[in-house]
Amino acid sequence: MHEKQKTKRKENDKGKDRDATRDARRKAEEAEQRVTVLESRIAGITGTLADPELYTTVDGKRRAVNLGRDLEVMKKKLDDAINDWTSATQAAESGGVKAR
């Protein structure tokens, strides 16, 4: 009777480990997608700010200031996404055990 319980517990633990690993991989993939999207947005904003034509228009200075703010927000979000991606990747590689 006790052997069956031990075996069942081991099987349950393996199932939980698989679920945790699967969840960590999913989180890593989602974070990677966020990183890709944010990098693209940052490149777009940077390209717009690098265009000299922006500064020759009537509202160019205002747009540049707003784009600069947006760029800083995107960079912060990118840092967060990279940290999430790193943590999730480490967790997936360690079998679903959450990395610190």
Image (cartoon, rainbow, N blue to C red):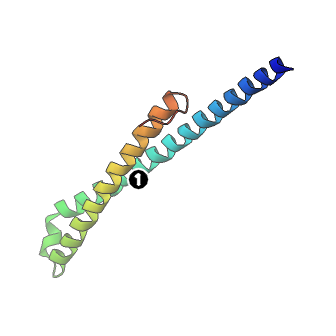
Name the residue located 28 percent from the left edge and 55 percent from the top edge. 75
Above-or-below relation of 67 to 5: below
**Residue 42 at what x, y percent from top left?**
30, 56
Front in this rendered view, residue 33 or 60 = 33
- In the rendered image, the residue lying farthest to the top is 3
Q: Of all residues shown, which one is farthest toward the right? A: 1
- Badge 1: how crowded within 10 Å, few (<14), some, or many (20+)? few
> Which SS class for mark 1?
helix
Residue nearest the observer in this picture, 72 or 87: 87
- x, y percentage for residue 70? 28, 65
Query: Residue 3: which quarter of the image?
Result: top right
Q: Residue at x 13, y 72 (%)?
A: 55
Left or right: 53 in relation to 34: left
Q: Left or right of 62: which side holds 11? A: right
Q: Is residue 32 above or below residue 71?
A: above
The amino acid pointed to by label 1 is Val
Question: Is residue 29 among what the camera can see?
Answer: yes
Residue 39 appearing in the image: no
Q: Is residue 75 left or right of residue 6?
A: left
Which residue is rendered at x = 50% and y = 47% of the image?
Answer: 30
Closer-to-camera residue (89/68): 89
Dividing the picture into quarters, in which one does residue 1 lie? top right
Looking at the image, which residue sits at the far bottom?
Answer: 58
Query: Quadrant where the C terminus lies?
Result: top left
Place residue 38 in its image quadrant.
bottom left
Quick one: 97 or 66, which is closer to the camera? 97
Tell me where residue 13 appears, x and y as whole percent. Answer: 68, 29
Residue wearing tag 1: 37
* x and y, in percent, of residue 36 in the image: 40, 48
